[in-house]
Image (tube, rainbow, N blue to C red):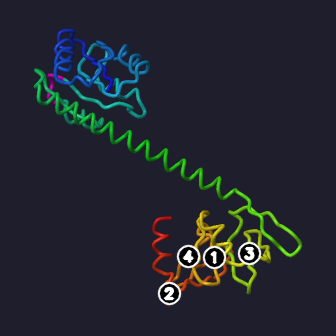
Amino acid sequence: MKALIIDDESNQRSVLLELLTKYCPALQVLGEADNITDAYQQIQQLQPDIVFLDVEMPHGTGFDLLKKFDDIPFEVIFVTGFGHYAVQAFEFNALHFIHKPINDLKLIAAVEKARVRLQEKQRDHYNKIVLENLKRSTDDQLNNRIAIPIFEGLEFVRVKEIIRCESDGGNTSIFLSSGNRIYSTKNLKQYQRILEDYSFFRTHNSHLVNISHIKKYLKQDGGEVIMSDGSNVPVSFRRKSAFLSVMEDF
């Protein structure tokens, strides 16, 4: 973790630095500032994880410094001799408020709290990236084209354009978002193997649907789904439980 110490009193900066070095070895103090102008420049340049901030300083307060940021991108630990600022400090989402003279245990607890919160932010950021990549990967997949055997030869269709497939004897009718219908010489089981990896689900012996095109599920008997083209597709009773499980995770 990277930190800055902002306090107009040099002896107080030295005391805090000494305590952090002794009790919080995982913390690296990158710099110090004795006014909000220098502090703002150092924050922009060094991008610390934690800022130890005094309140009353020449030419502005610690609150004036925080007001310069639309979104405060670091954890704030106030270290001050003025207890009446505590309420205002927490209005700025301060992580901790430490009174001078500094209590060792309170300082250690504040730094530990900062470490936990930073880890949570990092995990949330990582999860967001994973989800975005997963969505991008799914979108890319759905843009893939597959070759559909027809009586005359082959027809190439993007996966995302397929609303549903319906068994037609040993053949398959494929319904597209354009309103077109393709008669394929492959049977439905073959399409199930091809399309299961693209979020298709076989709701019934005769029906395979693109989950992305489902608009509504009606729970009657086994149930049925209404697709984006307005068609009603049955969900067989024995597939209902698996279907609902898939939909909850989708």
Helix, strand, or loop for circle 2? helix
Instruction: Please count the marks in the image.
Output: 4
Please name whichever residue, 56 or 137, is drawn nearer the observer in this view of the structure. Answer: 137
Circles 1, 4 touching at the beta carbon (< 8 Å): no
**Residue 58 quadrant:** top left
Q: Earlier in the sequence, mark 1 or mark 2?
A: 1
Mark 3 to mark 4 CA distance (whole Å): 20 Å
Residue range highlighted in magenta: 80-84
Residue 74, x across and y down, in percent: 35, 30
- Marks 3 and 2 sit apart, C-alpha to C-alpha, by 24 Å
Earlier in the chain: of badge 3 and badge 1, it is 3
Camera-nearest label, 4 or 2:
2
* Three-letter amino acid code at the position of disc 1: Leu
- The residue carrying mark 4 is 216
Judging by the rendered image, the residue that carries numbered circle 3 is: 174
**Residue 96, image x and y in percent?**
21, 33
Q: Nearer the viewer, residue 39 or 17?
A: 17
Residue type at mark 2: give it. Phe
Q: Residue at x 60, y 78 (%)?
A: 226
The residue beneath circle 2 is 237
Specify the label residue 208 is tagged with: 1
Q: Locate residue 109 relative to residue 38 in the image: left or right.
A: left
- Disc 4, SS: strand
Q: Are marks 3 and 2 in contact (CB under 8 Å)?
A: no
Q: Amino acid at mark 3?
A: Ile
N-terminal of the two: label 3 or label 2? 3
Measure how far apart labels 4 and 2 are at the Cα level: 17 Å
Residue at 50% across, 76% down: 243
Percent x, y of residue 98: 16, 28
